[in-house]
Amino acid sequence: MRILIKNAELITMNRGEEIFCGDLLIENDRIAKIGRGLRERADKVIDGTGKTVIPGFIQTHIHLCQTLFRGQADDMELLDWLKQRVLPLEGAHDEESIYYSAMLGIGELIQSGTTSIVDMETVHHTDAAFQAMAEGGIRVLSGKVMMDHGEDTPPSLREKTEESIRKSVDLLEKWHGYDGGRIQYAFCPRFVISCTEELLIEVRDLAERYDVRIHSHASENRGEIEWVERERGMRNILYLDHIGLASPRLILAHCVWLNEEEHQVLRERGVKVTHCPGSNLKLASGIAEVPEMLGRETRVSLGADGAACNNNLDMFNEMRLAALIQKPAHGPTAMRAREVFRMATIGGAKAMGMDREVGSLEEGKKADLAILDLNDFHTYPSSEVDPISRIVYSATRADVETTIIDGKVVMENRFVCTVDKKNVLKESNRSIQRLLKRICEKV
């Protein structure tokens, strides 16, 4: 399959971050050529006149298993949110509800131009989530969550250490590398509070053995940090470093509350940090010190987290928030639009270890991209405006017209081709009703 996009504004995010009006040729799953006036045979030609082509957004912290919980746990702080609402709902999941929760999230992500995610599932039925990812066409690094510890972990989610490890390895061996590498596996210990040291050390060793990433949470909330200090004798990041888990393989969501020594560990060990501004604001967790991290050359990317704590999975929303929330404290030049857009694209690719494959529009890279139609009231005038500032500060997910992943058109003219929208919406309502009933019956 050869797709030719003609006469579009191309925001490449290549090494020189070039922006120009030209053409882009896709052959099978790769970008074959980029240039001006391409005269290539193609099976499909897309007229990009007046449109903008960007690398697909890469969100490095998502919970597809929580998409069904949208609106079920609003206006709560993190630990109460987890104990009272989210963990019981996760424990009530069945295979069908996991599948439709994932499909609901995938449809939303594709509609808003996200092409790759780093996802964390729940303890059970993860195979059903991977099936949804396989069908939905999104690029994903995902794994089952691991929870073998904690008095607040509900019995429905509490695992035996050996069982958690065995199930994780089984899933890795089944799904890692699926569809030419579109689906990859990551070990996902939830956070220190819910994991024994034995499990975390085994994850460290298994990740090295299989050469895969580790995806977890850390230092999101002051109460979490106090708990870790009380039980493990040191602060979160220092503890992870103490047991050898802090490394370039590790992707940590949040990292809101860090001291000087922890900042140093993140930089020196090459740990990747995911900034989730929408989630952190809604749960009143705080504002991560992103300018400081970037100043230290710590790798920071963006994620929406889950719909249970953000209510949408929209990268446009996260980019705007990431830029704006730092300015009152650090001045108007903090978190410039280009820096934020970099975090949302090539920065996410670096967190996934895939920056040679995705994150920019370059010949030879995977054809993961979005086409925006910015011809509307809220994005004009367009003349003499920085195209990236226009996207970060003015555009919305409704401006995404077409999304292409792995060279396949997964959304065209706002119609998602890989998700049966009518059925997913219907089954999502049925599924959340079933989960809520199941929780009530246990009380």
Image (tube, rainbow, N blue to C red):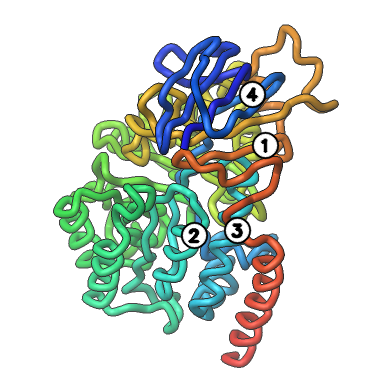
| Among the two numbered marks 1 and 3 on one chain, the one whose residue lies closer to the N terminus | 1
In whole angstroms, how far apart are the C-alphas of marks 2 and 3? 8 Å
Which numbered disc, 1 or 3, marks the residue closer to the eye? 3
Which of 100/240 is in front? 100
Between discs 2 and 3, the one toward the N terminus? 2
Q: Is residue 280 above or below residue 346?
A: below
Residue at mark 2: 135
- Left or right, 111 with respect to 292, comes to right
Q: Which residue is mark 1?
A: 400
SS state under label 1: strand
Q: Are marks 2 and 4 in contact (CB under 8 Å)?
A: no
Identify which amino acid the numbered label 1 is placed on: Val
Amino acid found under the numbered disc labelled 2: Glu
Whole-percent x and y of residue 212? Answer: 25, 50
Mark 1 / mark 2, whichever is N-terminal = 2
**Residue at mark 4:** 52
Sequence-first tag of 4 and 1: 4
